[in-house]
Image (spheres, grey):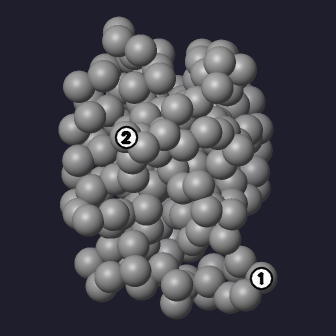
Amino acid sequence: MNKKNVSILLICGSHRQDSMTRVAMQTLQGRLSLQGADCEIFDPSAGCASVCGVMLSNEQHQSLLEAVARSSAVVLCTPEYNGSFSALIKSIIEHLGYPSTLSGKPTALLGVAAGGIGAVKALEHLQSVCLHNGAVVIPPYVSIHHVDQQFDRQGNCTNDKIIQLLDALVLSLLAFVRR
């Protein structure tokens, strides 16, 4: 495989500092780094929340647009809330405009959920929105079920099957970008 250096932007779809979305995203970041990818995280947790959704400051908005534009690929990380992805991820996608900065961008999806089937519904919805915006959604997406049971207190994944799923996502994304 070509070892062309790539830049991956990971976007966190949770405001909570102690969120399992963030823990799973950081695990994925580590797996990407092991394969030589340069990773950047966009974490809007310092943003302003409005009653009807999430608003990014002008500075955050510009930072987001620039980060997506300069990245080789994007990973959207979301918790599943009520059978869909987070309002924060929806707001971030809306801040990318239309036509979207995601258009033509290789995009991977990571979802977490407390339930037994994982974030399958959230990722189905998110994939549809990404495709509508012209993103090139790279399979496989990763859905982590019973997320609160998959990581220890230090944030280390304790489930080898989840590590294998994350590694499959990493290899697929990097193979696509490096082709």
Residue kind at label 1, given as amino acid type: Gln
Q: Which mark is residue 52?
A: 2
- Up-down relation of residue 29 to residue 51 (above or below): below
- Up-down relation of residue 174 to residue 31 (above or below): above
The quarter of the image holding the N terminus is top right
Q: How many labels does the image show?
A: 2
Instruction: Using the image as rendered, state which of residue 1 and residue 66 is in the foreground.
Output: 66
Query: First in sequence: mark 1 or mark 2?
Result: 2
Residue at image point 35% right, 12% down: 98
- Check disc 2 and report its element: helix, strand or loop: loop
Residue at image point 75% right, 51% down: 33
* Horizontal and vertical percent position of residue 179: 52, 27
* Horizontal side of residue 85 vs 8, given as left or right: left
Of the residues tagged 1 and 2, which is closer to the observer? Answer: 2
Q: Residue 154 carries which label?
A: 1
Instruction: Using the image as rendered, state which of residue 166 and residue 55 is in the foreground.
Output: 55
- Check disc 1 and report its element: helix, strand or loop: loop
Measured Cα–Cα span from mark 1 to mark 2: 34 Å
Query: Do residues under tags 1 and 2 come within 8 Å of each other at their CB atoms?
Result: no
Residue at image point 34% right, 53% down: 85
Residue 87 appears in the picture as rendered: yes
* Label 1 crowd (10 A; few <14 / some 14-19 / many >=20): few
Residue at image point 54% right, 43% down: 49
* Horizontal side of residue 40 vs 16, given as left or right: right
* Horizontal and vertical percent position of residue 112: 43, 68
- Up-down relation of residue 157 to residue 83 (above or below): below
